[in-house]
Image (spheres, rainbow, N blue to C red):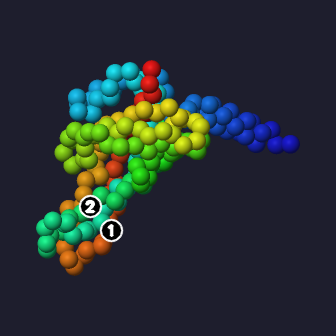
Amino acid sequence: MNRPLIAVAAVALTTLLSACSTMAPMSTSMATPQAPAAVTVPAGNKVAMMAVGAGDLNYECRAKADMPGAFAWVFTGPDALLLDKNKATVGKYYGGPTWESNDGSKVGGKQLAVAPGVAGAIPLQLVQANLAVGSGAMTGVTYIQRLNTIGGVAPADVCSQAVMGSKKLVKYQADYYFYKAI
C-alpha cells in the first residue's frame, strides 16, 4: 500500500471529524443579548439557542389598498438558512413565519413588537412562539428575538402600475435568539 497516501487520508479524516464534533445543532448556553425595551423578552424565559438567518426577503409590487393609483413593495415572506456559529446549516426560515430545525421540529409565531434596526436594515423583532410541531430543538420555544439585522429593506426600484406583480429578492441577515421558559 502507498503509505504517504494513507497518512494524508488519516490526517484528512482526523481534521474532518474534529471539525464535525464542534458543530452543535444550534449555538446553546447563550447569555441574554442586549435589546431595546420594545423587543425584550419577558422575564421567566432564557436563551436556549441562537442561529444566524441568512438569505432573501421576498417583496412584490402591489397596489396600495386605500390609495387608488399608488403602489408599494410589499413583504411576502423570507427564504433563509439558519446557521450555527461555524456557519453550518442547522435549519431554515420561511413564510408563515416558520423556523424549522434540521431535526424536523418547527415553530411559528405572532409578531409582538418591533424596534428600529440600523440604517438600511429591517427592524428588530419580538415574536411570541406557537406550540412547536415535531420533537426537537424547537420544542418548548416561547419567544424568538430578531437582532443585529443587516439589509432586507424593501427595494428602492420603482413600483408602479407598469411593474405591478413584479417580485424582488433582497439579501438580509439577522441573529435569531430562541427562548424557552425557565
114 relative to 182, above or below: below
Q: CA distance from mark 2 to mark 1?
A: 9 Å
Mark in the foreground, 2 or 1: 2
Q: Quadrant of the N terminus?
A: top right
Q: Position of residue 145 (x, y in %)?
A: 35, 36
3 relative to 58, above or below: above
Asked whether the viewer can see residue 32, the reply is yes
Which residue is identified by label 2?
Answer: 74
Q: Secondary structure at mark 1?
A: strand
Q: Position of residue 120 (x, y in %)?
A: 21, 49
Q: Residue at x 37, y 56 (%)?
A: 77
Q: Residue furthest right?
A: 1
What amino acid does circle 1 point to? Lys
Q: Residue at x 76, y 42 (%)?
A: 5
Looking at the picture, tell me which residue is in the foreground, 62 or 146: 62
Q: Residue at x 30, y 66 (%)?
A: 60
N-term-proximal mark, 2 vs 1: 2
Q: Tell whether label 1 touches label 2 (CB within 8 Å).
A: no
Q: Position of residue 97 (x, y in %)?
A: 40, 49
Looking at the picture, tell me which residue is in the foreground, 151 or 131: 131
Asked where in the image residue 182 lies, by quadrant, the reply is: top left
Q: Position of residue 116 (x, y in %)?
A: 20, 41
Q: Residue at x 41, y 38 (%)?
A: 129
41 relative position to 142: left or right:
left
What amino acid does circle 2 point to? Val
Which residue is identified by label 1?
Answer: 167
68 relative position to 98: left or right:
left
Asked whether the viewer can see residue 159, the reply is no
